Image: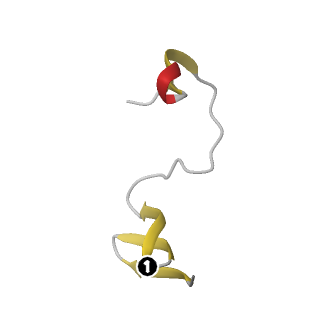
Amino acid sequence: MSTELIVNASLPETRIALVEGGEIQELLIERATGKGIVGNIYKGRVTRVLPGMQAAFVDIGLE
């Protein structure tokens, strides 16, 4: 299985895709006009838990 990292850097955004075996595994889009929140650490409050999906909704105070 081949692994590729595809980068498209142009204004107004940069797009990066991790492709394994011809399928996109991860996709990152970063816009120059807005602040990115990927990798930041936030304090939040759990507002709802979905046990069947093993997931939770967390309010971090953004809009």
Q: Residue at x 37, y 59 (%)?
A: 33
Q: Residue at x 47, y 80 (%)?
A: 7
Please determine whether, in this image, residue 7 is positioned above or below residue 45. below
Q: Quadrant of the C terminus?
A: top left
Is 38 or 17 nearer to us in this picture? 17
Tag 1 residue: 22
Image-quadrant location for residue 13:
bottom left
Q: Is residue 18 left or right of residue 15?
A: right
Q: Residue at x 66, y 39 (%)?
A: 41
Please determine whether, in this image, residue 35 is positioned above or below residue 50. below
- Name the image colouring: secondary structure
Q: Position of residue 15 (x, y in %)?
A: 42, 71
Local crowd at mark 1 within 10 Å, few (<14), some, or many (≥20)?
A: few
Q: Quadrant of the N terminus?
A: bottom right
Give amino acid for label 1: Gly
Is 55 or 41 nearer to us in this picture? 55
Q: Position of residue 5 (x, y in %)?
A: 54, 80
Q: How many marks?
A: 1
Q: Judging from the image, what secondary structure is the residue with disc 1 in?
A: loop
Is 6 or 14 nearer to us in this picture? 6
Q: Position of residue 36 (x, y in %)?
A: 49, 52
Residue at far left of view? 12
Q: Residue at x 47, y 72 (%)?
A: 17
